[in-house]
Amino acid sequence: IINNYLGGTQGGAVDKASPSGMHFRDSKRKVDYVLAYHYRKRLARHPAGAGSPEPMHGSASLALVSNGGTGKGSVELQQQDGGQHAPQERPRPLGVEVIELGPLDTLEDEKRLQREEYERNLVEVGLEIEKDPENKSQGLSFVRIHAPWQVLSREAELLKIKMPTKKMYEITEEGGILKTLNEIWCKLTKPLQPQVPQQENTNMKTLSYPFSREKIYLYNIKDKDTFFDNATRSRIVHEILKRVSTKARNSTGIGTLIANHVYDAAYPLHDGEYEGQNDDMNERKLLYREWARYGVFYKFQPIDLIRKYFGEKIGLYFAWLGLYTEFLIPSSVVGIIVFLYGCITIEGDIPSKEMCDQHNAFTMCPLCDKFCDYWNLSSACATARASHLFDNPATVFFSIFMALWATMFLEQWKRLQMRLSYFWDLTGLEEEEVSFLSEHPRPEYETKLLQKKLKNKNITTENSNEDEKEKLTWSDRMPGYAANFGLILFMIMLTFSAVFGVIVYRITTAAALSFSTNETTRSNVRVTVTATAVIINLVVILILDEIYGAVAKWLTEIEVPKTEKTFEERLILKAFLLKFVNSYAPIFYVAFFKGRFVGHPGHYVYVFEGYRMEECAPGGCLMELCIQLSIIMLGKQLIQNNLFEIGIPKLKKLFRKLKDERTEPKEMDINQSKDPQQWDLDYLLEPFTGLTPEYMEMIIQFGFVTLFVASFPLAPLFALLNNIIEVRLDAKKFVTEVRRPDTVRAKDIGIWYNILSGIGKLSVIINAFVIAVTSDFIPRLMYQYAYSQNGTMHGFINHTLSYFNVSHLKAGTQPENSPFAQDVLFCRFKDYREPPWSQNQYEFSKQYWAVLSARLAFVILFQNLVMFLSVLVDWMIPDIPKDISEQIKKEKSVLLDFFLKEEHEKLKLIESFIAPDKQKHKSGTKGERIRAASFCQFNRCQKGSFASFSSQHTEV
């Protein structure tokens, strides 16, 4: 290890930044990873009259740390340093006072020592690093990391990274009509394809195999510098950074050091600028031009390029989002047809005609006590006509269609996922690799474990080996679990309280507006209350959503999960539970509870004192459910998914920039190049926080599209319009506003698929209850086929209205100053109850029980029918496409043949070298084998990667 400090004059030639900002200052070694940290130097006190204070640690124009394994520059530095292989402390300058260290100085020294040890350990594992000089009293500095070939090949073998071999084989395509249709489709959609470089022959696929240094002859290595692409290189370095430890505080990996603020950030570099005047095309610029702009919203996504640049996990997210958006197109079309059907048949709807008929007037009971008058049912004509747009027989068909749509979407995703796994070489992703990548303990877990060990310090030295294997037990985690249970329960109750608060608002506001002397205000009470209450609901949902996101993260952290995978899964479940309840609680109330606990005239149910429980509009609660669903869905998509996603990252970036400018002193840095380098530009970007927020907003939207679609057939259309923007918004964020994420291999979308499947099954039950309980579909069906005298809907409104004798109203609840009080003997209310002249007056009638039975029967029938059809669709569509399963089998046989052929060629090569030896020295078979093995050993030494033929032959 060489710590080489060059003076300002000596470092002039070396201190030149690389022109591309992607390499070390020698413009040869590529920057694979960057560590950033803030430093603060301790200034020495000088006697009075001395010059300006100088930092104790001498400044330098450049500090290079290298393992000295490659490059001419490293050798020269080693010679200058006298060939020493350990960092040396500089002797203390004479005349410097010994001063007391303040708390900040001690902390900074501790961080500096941890950084030095960590960087020393990185060099020991083979990485090469380059450091910025610390020329200011405090500021930002970067450590750039390069992985040489030896490290890349070693780690690629350890991680079992699949790399392309020399062998290519032909992909067998399906023939017949499917092939013809596919060709026609490709020609029609050619203008929609992104202009990105693609494989010349799409019918050929390169055979891939987990990298092995022993079988290096299998791989198509033209240039060692470009064999591993940038994403793979950064992934390898990231795995090393997570693994390397420091003795200080028992820190394991870069995650712990960042958590302890030793480093501020660690990230791989983007591939240069995404827009600029230069003609150099890189993958980032290509993604921006063909994918991350709103101007290319009509084009397909370049999924393969996304996967290559960002990794499989992010590639799968955008592939899933693209498929979901495509599937919204047919559901939107069917939803529009259902809505248009309601518009066309509205004039022929007999119940709404009867309700609007002025001559066939129904005098309704007052909507509130004392201040509300009797009213005519025909005044609710507009509401009844609007309800028919969504409450019609086509809605039932649409609910069944959407349940099957959700099943088909999930089945198609499984097929697409399998296809991508094949082409992305994920089909053989071994469980060992997955466990190796996910079993790194989290920094917080290690800290908690260290605290436990320190607490149990009284254990004897004999048990020290047991301490190393110590882990957190149930008793350690019990406080976290208890806090989780209590706080989640509290948060759910808080959501219900917010819903109840809005209910109280609606009741009190409706009562207050009913007292108004303005006729217009009194006539529009229901519309005013509904609109304002829904807006309040939306605001509460948006505020609680942000709170619940932070609370879910904090609750998961106090649980102290061991691995990142466990942490992510638990966070997703908590956040989804809280946000699901928050988003859908007001909608559930309107759909299933509003108007069910009202009572009847003369025996109303009251909230607090004098406030009656609210009831549904004369046309039913479905119209109000539609309004509630549409405003909450559109509001969340417009404000949360779009405005917040665009605005918040920009505000964070501005805040971080202002903070850095305020904390760093205005000092001249003689080594700062005029143009900022790529690591400077990337540091200013927002850190990548994972895909959980992206998935979450789409899953909640999926719930809006499927759960209550019976009440709002246009939900898929609005989701489609949102997603067209959402795809480009997310793309722009990933390409331009976020630091490049670490590439992560993943076979599927993980727990999100289970959540989607659960929502799909729940949607069947909820839509069955919406049609049966909330809409008038069952009462209309029952009337037409059981109670109507002529089999038509004439008389349906009269059939659903019960009679009430106004003389039975409680004292003090009768309308005051009513002009109709003398003329009205009976008023009507919507319910199935016995009339006042019956022996069991105001009890539930036989029709009520008959309709209730029909509703329950419909729920059971609908649920079982749709579930059966869903299972049938699932069974008919295989999870793995037939052509892909055949290709996977073919790939295995091609791989075996390729191995045998390569081994045979190698055997012939060895024999050609042995043949001259046979003629010169006629020795026994044993000697020939020894020479063959010697040749293999010699060959391995020359290339650095070969193994003996015998060992390879045995493995094959």
Image (cartoon, rainbow, N blue to C red):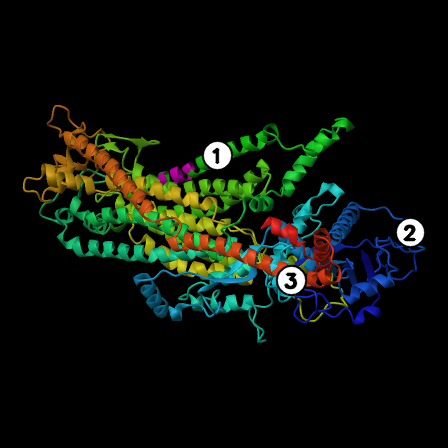
Badge number at residue 490: 1
| Neighbour tally class for label 1: few under 14, some 14-19, many 20 plus, Cα within 10 Å | few
Q: Quadrant of the N terminus?
A: bottom right
Q: Quadrant of residue 497?
A: top left
Q: Name the kind of residue labelled 3 in the image.
A: Leu
Query: For mark 3, what is the residue?
Result: 909
Q: Residue at x 21, y 53 (%)?
A: 342
At mark 1, the secondary structure is: helix
- Amino acid type, mark 1: Phe
Tell me if residue 501 is in the magenta stretch: yes
Which circle marks residue 97 in the picture?
A: 2
Mark 3, secondary structure of its residue: helix
Please give left or right for residue 928 compared with residue 905 in the image.
right
Q: Is residue 182 left or right of residue 620?
A: right
Dot 3 or dot 1: first in sequence order is 1
Q: Residue 583: x, y in percent?
A: 41, 44
CA neighbours of label 3 inside 10 A, class few (<14), some (14 to 19), many (20+): few
The answer to whether mark 2 and mark 1 are in CB contact below 8 A is no
Q: Is residue 81 visible?
A: yes
In the rendered image, residue 235, in percent from the top left (x then y), is placed at: 61, 55
